[in-house]
Image: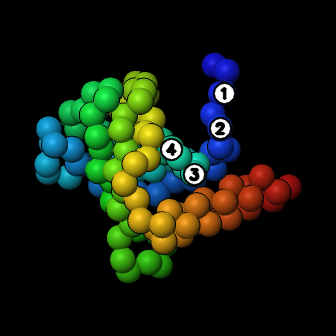
Amino acid sequence: MDDKRKYMRFGFLLDAQVSSDEYPSAGSARVINISRQGAAVEVDAHVPFAEHSVLKVKTYLPGGHLPIAFEGKVVWVRQKGAQRIAGLALHDMESRNKSDLLDYAYKSWHTREFAH
């Protein structure tokens, strides 16, 4: 797949909870990467959502006490074993949360990329 994204994505793993208008009870997920305008979230297969729906994501940074919450429109979905991966276009995220999450993601990525 050609990567035509405008901003670089930084891979990392953070446990999360997701919900949507169709599924208001939180389901398990993991945030697996993020950029300035998008994110990918690995979601348990039993959590119903479809392309163009809005997922609400809540996660915590390691050692953090306050949740980082954001919403994104599902722009693509791929099956991966018992999970589905949703590509999100971010549209509702506080600036401070975005900054904290991007800082964490960059540091995680940088540590892996340059650890050799």
Label placed on residue 6: 2
Residue at image position (63%, 19%) is: 1
- Is residue 17 at least partly visible in the picture? yes
Secondary structure at numbered mark 3: loop
Percent position (x, y) of residue 106?
66, 60
Separation (CA) of disc 2 from disc 1: 9 Å
Are there few (<14), some (14-19), or many (20+) residues within 10 Å of tag 2?
few
Label placed on residue 38: 4
Marks 3 & 4, CB-CB < 8 Å contact: yes
Percent position (x, y) of residue 32?
51, 47
Question: Where, by quadrant of the figure, is residue 47 drawn?
Answer: top left
- Is residue 81 at least partly visible in the picture? no
Percent position (x, y) of residue 51?
32, 26
Secondary structure at numbered mark 1: loop
Task: State the residue lying farthest toward the right.
Answer: 116
Marks 2 & 3, CB-CB < 8 Å contact: no
Separation (CA) of disc 3 from disc 1: 15 Å
The residue singled out by tag 1 in the image is 3
Residue at image position (38%, 80%) is: 65
The residue singled out by tag 3 in the image is 36
Q: Nearer the viewer, residue 37 or 18?
A: 37
Separation (CA) of disc 2 from disc 3: 9 Å
Please, what is the three-letter code of the amino acid marked with disc 2? Lys
Residue at image position (47%, 79%) is: 63
Please, what is the three-letter code of the amino acid marked with disc 4? Gly
Look at the image and tell me in which quarter the C terminus lies: bottom right
Nearest to viewer (mark 2 / mark 1): 2
